[in-house]
Amino acid sequence: MPNSNKKIPFRYDIVGSFLRPEHLKNARTAFADGDLSKEELTKVEDKAIIELIEKQKTAGLYAVTDGEFRRRWWHLDFIAGLNGITVYDFQTTAFGLTTEAQGTYVSGPLSFSDNHPFLEHFRFTQKYASPALAKQTIPGPNMIFLDSLILSKQYNEQPIYDSLEAFKKDLIQTYQNAIQAFYDAGCRYLQLDDTSWGGLFDDRFREMIKANGLDADQLLTDFQEVTEKSLANKPADLAVTFHFCKGNFQSHWLYNGSYEKIAKNLFSIDAFDGFFLEYDDERSGGFEPLKELKDQRIVLGLITTKNGQLESSDMLVERINEAAQFVPLEQICLSPQCGFASTHEGNHLTEDDQWQKIELLKTVAETVWQDA
């Protein structure tokens, strides 16, 4: 599976997370209950990740991940490992169901820790990835900007920074250091998962932002600036992609609205090699915003991870051709719309469903593109 001649993002690619095997879920429960040590849990995780990597390689994927098997949440585990962040428990109905959740807020000056556990997690994945490429996923900086500061009741009651500019400076430095640390650990394919941009076009969240004394349209400029500057020192041989979906919590979504409002700012971030965008249902809107794309690749998330129904290959080809009316086919790739398990609970489909969708992903890409 040599990929030295393949361009990132790949013609058929993945977002990153996979359904946790039942024995891994049981082990995490036993650890939480105090019936399993951290060392014993790590052994279970290690074995499950090695098996997952082999399955990904067998499926023909050029980039493989650890499935995010060591995480409870797709984003929070990384953010919690930063200096200046506090985690708290709460109950939410944001995704249309009542469930226990966790949140974060900025409680001190932000910085990246050289001992961040994700660095060792990446090294483990890389050890077993060959001949595929080890792909690392982390939440984008604006997840912290929106959730841990702008919309955070705790932060707004006791702000740490004198100004947004001072906060942005630390946030940017934190991510510059994180990106360099992953590169130094051997990472050559990094993905920033960042759903926070949805808050800039979803009417409900725009009102929440306004209630906190800020303007969503101005934040669009701020989000672009923070992301661009976070990537400013990116090594030339490090590929970085951006993934956006409108929420993926146990098959439920969070944001509504069109990409039109964010497309120009987002696609202007030249340091990204490609953009993964959700396009698995009518809430995604049309492909017209793709006209704003420059010369990067766009990865169409046409295969849903929210349910096990297998898409028609003809439908997928048709949708790709529709998108090609707005951006050259050469710049288009294909992926699932999100991961299969953005949280440890996972989405409402089976492991068989998951791998059938991966097989379909490869089959359709090889039908459409000769270089797949």
Image: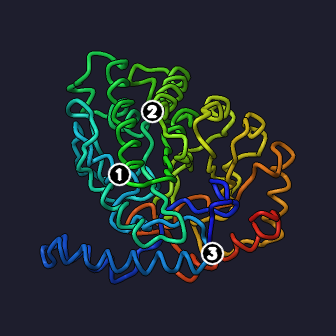
Image quarter of residue 127: bottom left
- Residue ID for mark 3: 60
Quadrant that contains the N terminus: bottom right
How many marks do you count on the picture?
3
Nearer to me, 1 or 369 = 1
Look at the numbered disc 1 and give the secondary structure of its residue: strand
How far across and how far down the image is residue 92, in percent? 35, 51
Look at the numbered disc 2 and give the secondary structure of its residue: helix
The image's mark for residue 92 is 1
How far across and how far down the image is residue 298, in percent? 69, 48
Quadrant that contains the C terminus: bottom right
In the image, 219: left or right of 50? Answer: right
Answer with mark 1 or mark 3, whichever residue precedes in sequence: 3
The amino acid on which the numbered mark 2 sits, given as a three-letter code, is: Ser
The image's mark for residue 230 is 2
For the point 80% across and 58% down, the residue is 319
Answer with mark 3 or mark 2, whichever residue precedes in sequence: 3
Look at the numbered disc 3 and give the secondary structure of its residue: loop
The amino acid on which the numbered mark 3 sits, given as a three-letter code, is: Gly
For the point 33% across and 83% down, the residue is 23
Disc 1/disc 3 C-alpha distance (Å): 38 Å
Mark 1 against mark 2, which lies toward the viewer? 2
